[in-house]
Image (spheres, coloured by chain):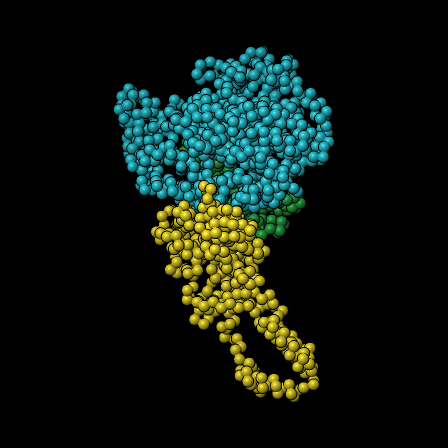
Chain colours: A green, B cyan, C yellow
Amino acid sequence: MEEIKITCKQIEELKLKAQQHKGKPGPLMPTLQDAQNIMGCVPKEIQMLISEELNEPVAKINGIISFYAQFSEIPKGKKVIGVCIGTACYVKGSQKILDLMVKELGIKTGETTDDHQFTLEATRCIGACGLAPVMSINEEVHGKLVTSTAKDILDNARSEN
Amino acid sequence: MIKSKAELMKKYQQTKDKIENRKGKIDLKKREVLVCTGTGCMSSKSKKIVANLEEAIAELNLDVEVHGTGCLGFCEKGPIVKIMPDDTFYSQVKVSEAKEIVTEHLLNNRIYTKKLYVNPLTKQKVEKTKDIPFYDNQVRIALRNCGFINAESIDEYIGTKGYQALELSLTKSPDEVIEVVKASGLRGRGGGGFPTGLKWSFAKNNTGQKYILCNADEGDPGAFMDRSILEGDPHAIIEAMAIGGYAIGANYGYVYVRAEYPHAVERLNIAIEQARAEGLLGENIFGTEFSYDMEIRLGAGAFVCGEETALIASIEGDRGMPKTKPPFPANKGLWDAPTIINNVETYAVIPQIILNGAEWFKKIGTEKSSGTKVFALGGKVKNTGLIEVPMGITLRKIIEEIGGGVTKGREFKAVLTGGPSGGCLTKDHLDEIVDFDRLTELGSMMGSGGMIVLDDFNCMVDIAKFYMDFIVDESCGKCTPCREGTAAIHKMLADITDGKATIADLVELEKLCKMVKSTSLCGLGQTAPNPVLSTLRYFKDEYLEHIEEKRCAAGVCDGLISELFITDKCIGCTLCAKNCPVSCIAGERKELHVIEKDKCILCKDCFTRCPVGAIITR
Amino acid sequence: MIKLIINGNQIEVEENTTVLKAARELGIEIPTFCDDDRLSKQTSCRLCIVEVEGTDKLLTSCNLEVKEGMVVNTESEKVRIALKINLSLIWAGHPNDCMKCGKSGECKLQDYSFEYDVDAEPIYSVRKEAIAKNATNHFFEIDPDKCILCGKCVRICSEQVGVGALGFKNRGQETYVSFGNDNFEDAGCVSCGSCVSVCPTGALLNKTADKYRNWDVDKVRTTCSYCGVGCQMELVVHKGKIVRVDANEEGSNRGLLCVKGKYAFNFINHRDRLTTPLVRKNGKLVEATWEEAYAKINQKYLEFKGESNSFVGFSSARCTNEENYLFQKMFRQVFKTNNIDHCARL
């Protein structure tokens, strides 16, 4: 696994954000979301830092991080592949697309490849049901997939890395 | 800054003509191009189409504006480009074709027929949007501006009588506003169908600090109307929440949006900034005593946060775990203050109700479910997309007329409504009407408006298992029946699809479903067994087939399939052989084909491809 | 006052009383894991469900307020079926370990399973992965596999103790109770053991070298001797030895203790503990009888009578307030000195 690299600048940025949120009610979620955005993950050390900044028990912070799918204690891959398994996509065969990705990347859903290039996620409806089945690579959405086009898209993403 | 009715009307007059021209009601001799920049079309590079159109127009020095709009609904045919006021509808436009559209249509005044929509029934090309069957039978209130105005322009919103409902509300007393909403019969579009006006009056009767919330944590996998409204008409939500804030006495609002909807968040943020700059949010709105402001809070990926008490917990900065009711949020909600939560679609119709009156809204729909409902039509139906129809429309009209029927000539099997909390309806129900109460009576529910059509290649037990898998993943884990019960239900269903279950298990399954339904803490758990109970009700024979014959006729349940076999119904069309990824099908043209069992990988490609249904699983 | 009928018995209770409490007044014990008067309502175990006439749904009695004319049934067929399924679901993910579990005999899951005929062989299958025990605390350990997620430990720590060292982690079936971010050191835990006191199952248990069964002990109620708060506690005695201290919920401490009251009882059986008075003989303190000791005090008093500054009294914080009061009274009145102190500066 790749080591988590966090710079002083990132920490300063987070501290600033935390202080800004602290002035408003309910500062915990926005601060954690900022941490996730700034660092790509919220490791234990950062949880301790936020605990001190916002004066909240670390158990509570850890509880929130582990509750919501958006947060991660370890960094995600450079590209996050999300295969939609919402109902509209599922009934049109998105499970096959997901199975293909699992096979191609050699990882399970929710995992990151050893070279840290890809994270595979099974997402629940990104709201592009008209294009079912769909998958997304970071924020880019690809629709009306069949296994062969999905493979092409993956190969394309690989070549970009 | 807009500080009075006169200033609003002045602004309205400035853009009204442009809007009327776009509608074709007046003729300013000016064309506009609308490009869908909803998430669906954007994934097909519609932003690039906008850029290319603008570039081509600039090159030719034409006086034509290009607008990125919200979702036009007909996602199946995206990306969509419309020329107004001609109402020309170009579908599946490629980035490279933008320039040709400009030269052909805008410069040479010729319809660019290559990209016109073809009516699948008549095989005729259709020029105008209004002549496309998909848009027939639709009544657009919540979606009225989606795909029609530039979603990032407050001026265009004002040009469609935007913020006039807020201004009008502020001349009435809060009680009068609530009375209008009550009289309209509007019921919550998020799924529960609770009368909105009544809910507002509960909060109104409380004192002190109050909040108004918008639930945009759209989680039903297969529904995306909330996202489309936020992307296509964000000001309508801001206006409606301000009206709600005035009615109940709240001066602050939060919109809780899924983080998975970046475009919706961006557009809503732009809209909030614009409204603030115009003084439509902030202190003393329209020069009255009323002050109101709002902000966005992002969800973080938890379906259960669509439950209102969980949503509140999440905004407060806690795990999104539902709390027991009572106390209801209208009495004790966000930070213990009286709080009203409505869903995006509910808000989207409120300004129209205020402007046009309760009677106007009540006339649409059925007696107990007035108005329209937006559905995300998906699955095995030809025209997938977002539709808005009056309540009381039949399922047949939605599926066959708007949806264009089942794809690939397959047989309609069922339609799922209400997502993981709902159930299924069969072909016997096609002539049933769609409204809150009828769907519930039939064992399904309205839910947030997902409508997924299934054909005979879908297995109902598998669908029930699919939904239960979703619930097991999304259960917050607080109460025992939902946390452990849904996992046990999932395991029982898996046993059935693996051929390991007995008839006795089916009895236990039903017993367990009823227990989870009657004892779970929140709506998520209480409705979680619905897909199982509903499929058991209408497709019991399919369950029995899995258990007794160890057979899945739809060919979905891998655990029950040991081989694919070609029967003598085979006409020798060679389609299966040509497409087999491992080339294990042999046979001459017009002769019976045979599958080489040892080489077959059971991918079932041939099974779904065979035009005469000659291939069976066993 | 509100009149209602529970299981055919009429009862009159104050407004805002819950059905659970009203039933308790009638001597009807409704099962519950997560309800606790001292804590916020979680209503998550769903065991306290009752059937109310006129309502289709089963309602949780812990947060259901009584209403005039309410007719409640706590033992209907519907309730018993739902309870058996509920307990069977918990049992399906619980280790079958009662034979050697330290909680056996005092475990609510065990008691309710007996009451509602839960089969030993689980009838359901829930996909649960085992989570490792956390034994990093000096005094107790947590075994998430035995946890039923009633959340009492989490709530008592944040709401009553005011620390918030415990929290729920993950969601759905993967939820478990953890300290801090799975790291005991960072959790801020003060080891008061209140979480252990409220745990209805064997998920949070004291570490102990003593082997005893819960039906084989005596419980002696006493007052904590460490400070002046006067916390009420029960010494759990097995074969003449204190093996555990339970907090008593009736005292002013309402079931809370600090780390000293809860866990610092080893001195009682410690080999260095003084069990007799010591008298200095030939410059050395040696064990003596109380008669010898009193005689010595008497002798010294007579010897130095009138020289009040020659006396000093030193008392112990382990004595009760009354004993210490009498002790200082004796020194001030009899020995005529203010040279009096004690060790209650812990």
Question: Front-most of C34 and C14?
Answer: C14
* Residue B95: % across, % down: 54, 22
The number of numbered badges drawn on the structure is: 0
Question: Front-most of B291 and C9?
Answer: C9
Residue at 61% x, 67% y: name it. Answer: C228
Residue at 56% x, 65% y: name it. Answer: C231
* Residue B305: % across, % down: 53, 40
Answer with left or right where residue C47 lies relative to residue C261.
left
* Residue B577: % across, % down: 32, 25
Image quarter hosting the C terminus of chain B: top left
Residue at 37% x, 28% y: name it. Answer: B456
Image quarter hosting the N terminus of chain B: top right
Residue C283 visible, this angle: no
Answer with left or right where residue A84 lies relative to residue B316.
left
Residue B447 visible, this angle: yes
Residue at 60% x, 36% y: name it. Answer: B200
* Residue C73: % across, % down: 44, 48
Question: Front-most of A11 and C114?
Answer: C114
Question: Front-most of B493 and C42?
Answer: C42
